[in-house]
Image (cartoon, helix red, strand yellow):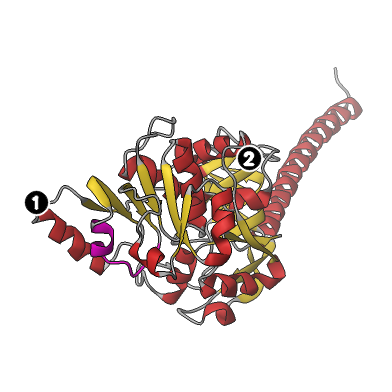
Amino acid sequence: MVDDNTANEAVVDEINKDEKKEDEVVKEETKEETKEEKNEEKEAKKEEKKMKAVYYTSYGGGANALKHGEITVPVPKKDEVLIKTEAVSINPLDLKVQHGSFRPLYPKGFPCIPASDIAGEVVDVGSEVKNFKAGDKVVAMLSSYVGGGLAEYSVAKENLTVQRPTEITAAEAAGLPLAGLAAYQALTNCAGIKLDGSASDKNILITAASGGVGFFAIQLAKLANLHVTATCGERNIELVKSVGADEVLDYKTPEGASLKSPSGKQYDFVIHCASSIGWSTFAHNLSTHGKVIELNYGAKSYWSVALRKVTFSKKQLVPMSFSAKGDNLESLVKLMKEGKLRTVVDSKHPFDKAENAWAKSAEGHATGKIIVEF
């Protein structure tokens, strides 16, 4: 027979066991709550992380409208990488977006952080990114119209991001995407030229050759073995020759204005990077099937193209059709690594003086690329 004391002890033991279990459950719940709180705090801190950026809050205003401030660091989507910016280039297109040339489509809102060509280091990747990891040095192209480059951190699509070899500096890489791709696609897509040295019997004219696109176009044209005639101002003639031009015209002279080849050649192709040159000036300098690739395509060009279509001339005015392509950018980076292509840098500006780079671009006389460094 069990006495009362033994029974009481048994009951107490059971109660103690139950209380111990309850304590363990409470501890586990507390741990989970603490873990959740820490995660929430971590996410909150992540959301609150700020970065320095340059932006504008309305259309127009040029360099004087640029503001320096702090905004939230962007979070990469599943197919994006977050890049700590080391260098960014300023393109004429950036100024056009600020001016309102693409309103109401772009920019999509204010404040707007401009610039699309960046080089830097990957610090975070989206859940579906396979080819990049934190620590990778890269060059990337953001949306030309949306921008985002003039900031300490930027997000770029994985398919528009390319590994940057150690042989290429951040400044050289940042100057490559938009200008390099424009030159590459004008030659390969629009003109149908192969960069394999097989075009030795062809001639090409490159206008405004001392600009960002022009310098790349000359170098790529020489890889195709084309005979290159280029136009630029007198002060840049030797520099333009140094990257491969066979002959150079000073656009301010009568000979330069006529676009006639000094060696009497007719052009099979023209990469037209300048403005205010009419079709008639090109027409009598072209070969029978000559093509003018028009990079500054506008209303005037539209009517010229329409006119060409209703004549019997085999000469063509071809509007440039640009497409951001990662594989094209990768090809250009490879050429740069091999020493077959280089970025000509006009000037470098510190991030805290980004407005100086903007003003320099607005002047319209840059020799090569304008770079902002962090």
First in sequence, mark 1 or 2: give its number: 2
Query: Picture quarter containing residue 21?
Result: top right
Q: Looking at numbered disc 1 in the image, what kind of residue is underneath it?
A: Phe
Q: Is residue 276 magenta?
A: yes
Residue at 57% over, 78% down: 63
Disc 1 crowd, CA 10 A, few/some/many (<14, 14-19, 20+): few
Disc 2 crowd, CA 10 A, few/some/many (<14, 14-19, 20+): many
Answer yes or no: is residue 73 visible. no
Q: Is residue 299 magenta?
A: no
In screen coordinates, is 319 left or right of 135? left
Residue at 53% over, 69% down: 365
The disc placed on residue 312 is: 1
Judging by the rendered image, the residue that carries numbered circle 2 is 164
The one of 37 and 335 positioned closer to us in this rendering:
335
- The region drawn magenta spans 274-283
The one of 91 and 222 positioned closer to us in this rendering:
222
Q: Looking at numbered disc 2 in the image, what kind of residue is underneath it?
A: Arg
Identify the element where label 2 is drawn.
loop
Residue at 37% over, 72% down: 101
